[in-house]
Image (cartoon, rainbow, N blue to C red):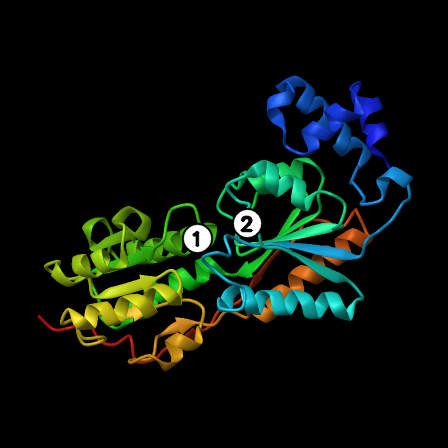
Amino acid sequence: MATLRDVAKLSGVSVATVSNVLNARSDRVSPETRERVLAAVRQLRYRPTALEKNQKAIVAQNLGVMVTDLTKNPILLHGYFRNTLDGIMEAAMFRGWSVTIFAEKMWDDLGLAIRRSYDGRCDGLIVIAPIQDSETVRTLQERGVPLVLVGATAPLPGVSSVDIDNEAAGAMAATHLLELGHKRFAFIAVSSIVTASNERERAFRARLASAGFDGDAVQTFRLREIQSIEALADILAQESPRRTGVFCWHDAMAVDLIPLLQRRGVSVPRDMSFVGVDDDPKGQTMSPPLTTFHQPLHAIGKRAANLLIDRLGEDRLPDEVVRFGVELLPRGSSGPAPTP
């Protein structure tokens, strides 16, 4: 097993310089030196170990799990994280591995993210729902950290991913609304930096375009650009003619938006139909129940953990892009387009 000193020797720098590079202290190292150190890391397949000072070849049998800002999405309250993590932990425990959750708000502090997750406590990392082109993911990949992404795709060597087939969901949502006779459509997202959301939107638009609906017939509303979901409800309720076929990138947005529209005199599904993604329990019990796609989050978590453990046991395993099939669950929130 390569050590920090081996990396320093191959790259022709001090151990302290290697440490600065690996811990993302880029202000202390020139770009040329940084690239030389990272090249040595990749060549030697170097990974830190918690007890490297003793130069023991130790496998911690510990998976790290990185999640987004948990001040907004507490694990025990957010179904997506809770169910995915439950699957990860079940698979890890079955195979005799432990799990460390990195729950700090690390995404806005690259140095903190790298130092906390790359200190040798974990043999590899599962990153749940990283933003598109995440610098944290790219930096970890450059340092040779074994990675599996959940809810995202990264075109980086050595990085596998597990998710539902987002493009199939987008196309099927469009087909469902088309079959109900809708002619004006909306896609509701949070921002443009969420990979899964972008994949769903792209396929949703492509399917509608194939049926002759594009341009003004289809509009994307991003919550971060509109500032509040109340403002979005005002836009949708007051627009004339209204957009009657609405696809929300996940259930939580529909669950929050539909009651606001109902208070503004919009009947669902008589005036406006909604489709979401997740099969969230809140969507099942709301009035009307939400048409949605089921996400097998427990199975996704299990697959991610098994992929990472298998890769840690055999370095030469190829990258995998695993996509679970989706099934539309029609419920009361979607119905025939309103007649003029």
Where residue 317 appears, x then y in whole percent? 76, 50
Q: Is residue 269 left or right of residue 320?
A: left
Q: Which residue does the numbered mark 2 point to in the structure image?
A: 153
Up-down relation of residue 275 to residue 63 (above or below) = below
Residue type, label 2: Thr
Q: Badge 1, how many Cα within 10 Å: few under 14, some, many 20+? A: some
Where residue 22 appears, x then y in whole percent? 70, 33
- Identity of the residue drawn at 27% across and 58% down: 229
Looking at the rendered structure, the secondary structure element under dot 2 is: loop
State if disc 1 and disc 2 touch (CB < 8 Å): yes
In-front residue for pair 142/211: 142
Locate residue 278: give its quadrant: bottom left
> Disc number at residue 199?
1
> Disc number at residue 234?
none
Where residue 67 appears, x then y in whole percent? 56, 54
Residue type, label 1: Glu
Q: CA distance from mark 2 to mark 1?
A: 10 Å
Up-down relation of residue 188 to residue 299 (above or below) = above
Whether residue 156 can be seen here: no
Up-down relation of residue 156 to residue 236 (above or below) = above
Q: Is residue 308 left or right of residue 204?
A: right
Instruction: Say how many tags the image has.
Output: 2
Tell me the quarter of the image containing the N terminus: top right
Q: Badge 2, how many Cα within 10 Å: few under 14, some, many 20+? A: many
Where residue 80 appears, x then y in whole percent? 51, 65
- Identity of the residue drawn at 79% across and 67% down: 95
Q: Is residue 217 left or right of residue 145?
A: left
- Identity of the residue drawn at 51% across and 56% down: 70
Looking at the rendered structure, the secondary structure element under dot 1 is: helix
In-front residue for pair 208/193: 193
Whether residue 112 can be seen here: yes
